[in-house]
Image (cartoon, grey):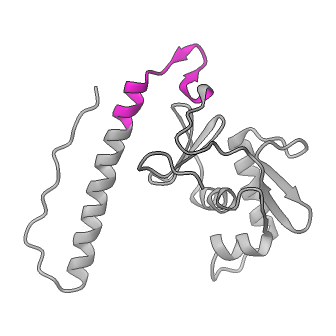
Amino acid sequence: MTKLGNENRIIFDPFCLDRSNECLWRGSQVIKLRPKAYAVLIQLVGRSGQLVTKVELLAAVWPETFVGDAVLKVTIRELRDALDDDPKAPAFIETAHRRGYRFIGQIAEGGQRLAKDQEIGSNAISASLLRAVHRGCDARVRAVRRLVRVFHAGRRGLDVVEVVLPAPQRVA
């Protein structure tokens, strides 16, 4: 997997898989995925170019749950719809009939920016606006992590004296 900067972002043209916020972006548009579809995509992208068997996907995404192949087929169809991927001529998810699936999209090398990610339709997105949005997301992620640490400290019986959260910042 490719990590860009300090964030867990995997870019495969024209998409960006944001692991820290558990979402898929197409330029500046968030593509809505159900949690299980997102989890399947993470499994496939994490083993890009390799066959991921149906059994492996079912065990990873639906652990200790009895589900059949049909639920996986529906989830893959949802992913293909989100990625505008044609199953007959796939660009991202290839089917290995009766065995599993393979992510075949080209993942960008670390630090590389793709030109198509920076322009949507006729509107160009400024790099400074993108950086501001990511700074805002980073602040929220840090705040949630701090809350989780405090929660776990409380569960372990440690005294939690004070939690200081940063004031919300507006992104101009």
Could you tell me which quadrant the N terminus lies in?
bottom right
Could you say which quadrant of the image residue 146 lies in?
Answer: bottom left
- The location of residue 21, given as percent across then percent down, is 45, 51
The residue shown at (34%, 32%) is: 132
- The location of residue 143, given as percent across then percent down, is 26, 55
Looking at the image, residue 111 sits to the left or right of residue 136; the answer is: right
In this rendering, the count of numbered labels is 0
| Residue 70 drawn above or below residue 134 | below
Could you say which quadrant of the image residue 66 lies in?
Answer: bottom right
- The location of residue 40, given as percent across then percent down, is 66, 61
Looking at the image, residue 98 sits to the left or right of residue 138; the answer is: right
Which region of the structure is painted magenta?
116-133
111 or 10: nearer the viewer: 111
12 or 152: nearer the viewer: 12
The residue shown at (63%, 78%) is: 63
Residue pushed farthest left? 161
Could you say which quadrant of the image residue 53 lies in?
Answer: bottom right
165 or 127: nearer the viewer: 127
The residue shown at (55%, 45%) is: 110
Residue pushed farthest bottom? 157
Residue pushed farthest top? 122
Was residue 119 drawn as part of the magenta stretch in this picture?
yes
Looking at the image, residue 151 sits to the left or right of residue 18; the answer is: left
Was residue 22 drawn as part of the magenta stretch in this picture?
no
Could you tell me which quadrant the C terminus lies in?
top left
| Residue 13 drawn above or below residue 63 | above
- The location of residue 10, given as percent across then percent down, is 57, 48
